[in-house]
Image (tube, grey):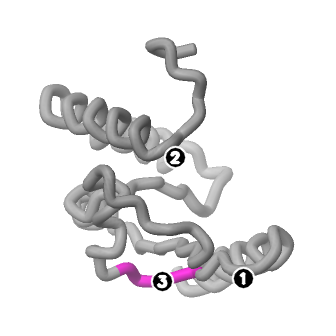
């Protein structure tokens, strides 16, 4: 248990986590440095074709795209309400993504969409 948190995410906890991330970003540029390290290792290791970077904030996404020449994908589950308690969750729709995947079916449907997406982007490299 980290900081007494049980791992359950509700709106109050998500707000706290967002604030912690904001502080780590402001003070240490943590997210960018962490992702930069992962990208460097990915490039050096020739056994994988794709690296997925999970980011919610439009400013960070834009920075990753600029620095690492990424393509972007937005996964939307219309059954889940957009949380407004913190900017990280509330602003995910404010970026102009390259691709959008709608997770509105079964887990198998979602897995098939993911496979189709990976095939599509790896064929167009």
87 relative position to 6: left or right:
left
Q: Nearer the viewer, mark 1 or mark 2?
A: 1
Q: Earlier in the sequence, mark 3 or mark 2?
A: 2
Quarter assignment of residue 82: bottom left
Q: Residue at x 53, y 57 (%)?
A: 52
Q: Position of residue 111 (x, y in %)?
A: 78, 71
Image vertical order of residue 87 relative to residue 114, above or below: above
The part of the chain drawn in magenta is 97-101
Q: Residue at x 57, y 67 (%)?
A: 80
Name the residue that disc number 1 marks: 116
How far, Cα to Cα, is label 1 from label 2? 22 Å
14 relative position to 32: left or right:
right
Tell me which secondary structure the magenta stretch mostly adopts. Answer: strand
79 relative position to 97: left or right:
right
Indicate the secondary structure of the residue bearing disc 3. strand
How many numbered badges does the structure rendering display? 3
Q: Residue at x 64, y 55 (%)?
A: 48
Image vertical order of residue 55 relative to residue 32, above or below: below
Name the residue that disc number 3 marks: 99
Quarter assignment of residue 59: bottom left
How far, Cα to Cα, is label 3 from label 2? 22 Å
Indicate the secondary structure of the residue bearing disc 2. helix
Please tell me the numbered disc located at residue 42: 2
Q: Is residue 19 visible?
A: yes
- Are the residues tagged 3 and 2 within 8 Å (C-beta)? no
């Amino acid at each position: 248990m980290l900081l007494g948190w049980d791992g359950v995410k509700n709106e109050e906890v998500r707000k706290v986590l967002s604030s912690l991330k904001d502080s780590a970003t402001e003070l240490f540029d943590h997210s960018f440095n962490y992702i930069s390290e992962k990208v460097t290792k990915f490039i050096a290791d020739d056994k994988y074709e794709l690296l997925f970077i999970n980011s919610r904030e439009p400013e960070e996404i834009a920075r990753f795209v600029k620095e690492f020449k990424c393509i972007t994908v937005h996964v939307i589950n219309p059954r889940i309400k957009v949380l407004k308690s913190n900017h990280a969750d509330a602003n995910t729709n404010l970026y102009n993504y390259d691709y959008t995947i709608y997770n509105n079916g079964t887990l198998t449907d979602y897995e098939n969409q993911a496979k189709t997406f990976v095939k599509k982007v790896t064929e167009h490299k």
